Image (cartoon, helix red, strand yellow):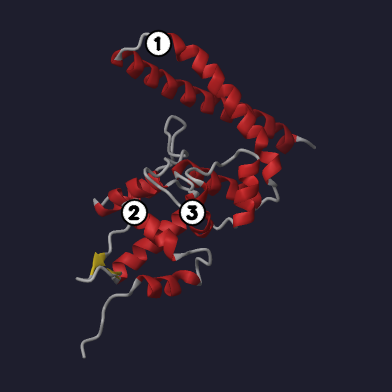
Amino acid sequence: MPTRNYQSIGEVLVSVKTEFPDITISKIRFLEAEGLLQPERTPSGYRKFYEQDVERLKSILRMQRDEYLPLKVIKERLLHQEAGDGEAATAAPPTPETDQDLAEPPTGLQMSIEEMASATGIDRDRIRELESFGLVCSHGPESAKYYDGDDYVVLSIVKDFFRHGVEPRHLTMYRHFAEREASFFESIIMPQLRQRNPEARRHAAVSLSELARASRKLKQALLRHNLRQYLQAP
């Protein structure tokens, strides 16, 4: 009988579990849905993970765990590596002008609370607690509640806060600030939106993107200034 030179998704899960205890089948499927993994399929539809597929999965998980990179950046880095210039891409640090520190919400994502807990490593009670503080929001009818890509991004970020003992209630200041900032930006672009023509709406979208980028840079600069005072204190 010929030796099988590939693994099933369950076998892959077992093989990487030691290094990545939080990995789940749901997360592997999610990475595939986002285009980061492309395993072959058997005629009956089962996934076939060859050695290069498993190594690619490990590289993705290491970039998420060690460098906190969003999926968009990981995908770009993998593309560079496949093109033969991965070494340069890995060495090049992100500049302040890029959006590499921002995770793009996965499009069309719909996960139950169980699936979201498996994919992010945040337990269901914590997710419900975050929802009670308005940091994530379930959608759909009561019998089929789901969380979307924006919720996935928020959960992936707040997980880093939890490692430092931060509780969900402490994070409400970010929601309040985001709401005030959104209202402020709305007042700026509203005159463009009132024109009700495609060009004005396109210009409004560009303005929003530029405002968000400027806001992010200003907050980073001010936070860095304040944190420097603590580090320089005798």
Q: Are discs 3 and 1 less than 8 Å apart at CB?
A: no
Q: Is residue 121 above or below residue 138?
A: below
Report the mark closest to the observer, 2 or 3.
Answer: 3
The N terminus lies in quadrant: bottom left
Q: Position of residue 215 (x, y in %)?
A: 53, 24
Say whether residue 231 is left or right of residue 224: right
Q: Mark 2 points at which residue?
A: 33
Amino acid carrying mark 3 in the image: Ser
Q: Identify the image quadrant of residue 191.
A: top left
Element type at marker 3?
A: loop
Amino acid carrying mark 1 in the image: Gln
Looking at the image, tell me whether mark 1 or mark 2 is earlier in sequence order: 2
Q: Residue at x 58, y 26 (%)?
A: 179
Q: Position of residue 106 (x, y in %)?
A: 40, 44
Say whether residue 131 is left or right of residue 35: right
As rendered, which of 169 and 197 lies closer to the eye? Answer: 197
Q: Position of residue 68 (x, y in %)?
A: 50, 49
Q: Residue furthest right?
A: 234
Q: Which residue is drawn at 62% across and 27% down?
A: 177
Amino acid carrying mark 2 in the image: Ala
Tell me, for residue 112, which label it has, or none: 3
Q: Is residue 155 above or below residue 215?
A: below
Looking at the image, tell me whether mark 3 or mark 1 is earlier in sequence order: 3
Work out how far the residue at label 1 is from the one at label 2, CA to CA, in angstroms. 37 Å
Q: Name the residue under label 1.
A: 192
The reply to whether residue 215 is visible in this rendering is yes
Q: Identify the image quadrant of residue 183.
A: top right
Looking at the image, tell me whether mark 2 or mark 3 is earlier in sequence order: 2
Element type at marker 1?
A: helix
The reply to whether residue 224 is visible in this rendering is no
Element type at marker 2?
A: helix
Work out how far the residue at label 3 is from the one at label 1, CA to CA, in angstroms. 38 Å
